[in-house]
Amino acid sequence: MQACLLVAAGGAVGAVARYLLGLIPISMDFPIMTMLINFFGSVLIGFVASSPNFSKEAILFLKTGVCGGFTTFSTFSLDTVHLLQGEKAMLGVANAAVSVGVCLIGVMIGEYLGRMLRTA
């Protein structure tokens, strides 16, 4: 039961953070905020997964809860499909390619930061 509460609390934190970031007014066709949210979530999950300093409870809260509530893969998918179906197919392809690439880089950055903590 404690594990479920940790995941739920983390999910709430992540979802509220995603909502608040989504309120930042950016006027462009490309869904940049969704990509940035996914990037920051990727950095966080890479960091948490590679750092030995987190307890099992903290990992549940941060990795499963916060990252699960914060990252927006379903929103990314919806944005991409809408771009592909509309007159902005090239933006849809770009969104898919750039978002995946940026998030892979985000995980690598997070893992690097986690490894840096080990040596500090």
Image (cartoon, grey):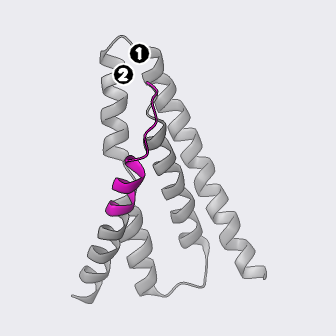
Near mark 1 (Cα within 10 A), the count class, few <14, some 14-19 or many ≥20, is some
Residue 83: which numbered mark, if any? 2
Instruction: Look at the image and say whether residue 20 sits in the magenta stretch.
Output: yes
What amino acid type is highlighted by mark number 2?
A: Leu
Q: Residue at x 24, y 80 (%)?
A: 4
Q: Quadrant of residue 57?
A: bottom left
Q: Is residue 25 above or below residue 109?
A: above
Indicate the quadrant containing the C terminus: top left, top right, bottom left or bottom right: bottom right
- Could you say where residue 9 lies in the image, as x and y percent from the top left? 30, 77
Q: Residue at x 32, y 61 (%)?
A: 15
Q: Position of residue 103 (x, y in %)?
A: 54, 47
Looking at the rendering, the stretch of residues picked out in magenta corresponds to 15-29
How many numbered tags mark residues here?
Answer: 2
Q: SS at mark 1? A: helix
* Residue type indicated by callout 1: Ala
| Position of residue 112 measured from the top left corner of the image (x, y, whole percent) | 70, 64
In the image, is residue 23 above or below residue 59?
A: above
Residue matched to label 1: 89
Front residue (pair 27, 95):
27
Q: Residue at x 37, y 56 (%)?
A: 20
Residue depicted at 36% across the width and 22% down the height:
83
Q: Which of these two is toward me, 118 or 23?
A: 23
Q: Residue furthest front?
A: 25
Pointers 2 and 1 in contact (C-beta within 8 Å): yes
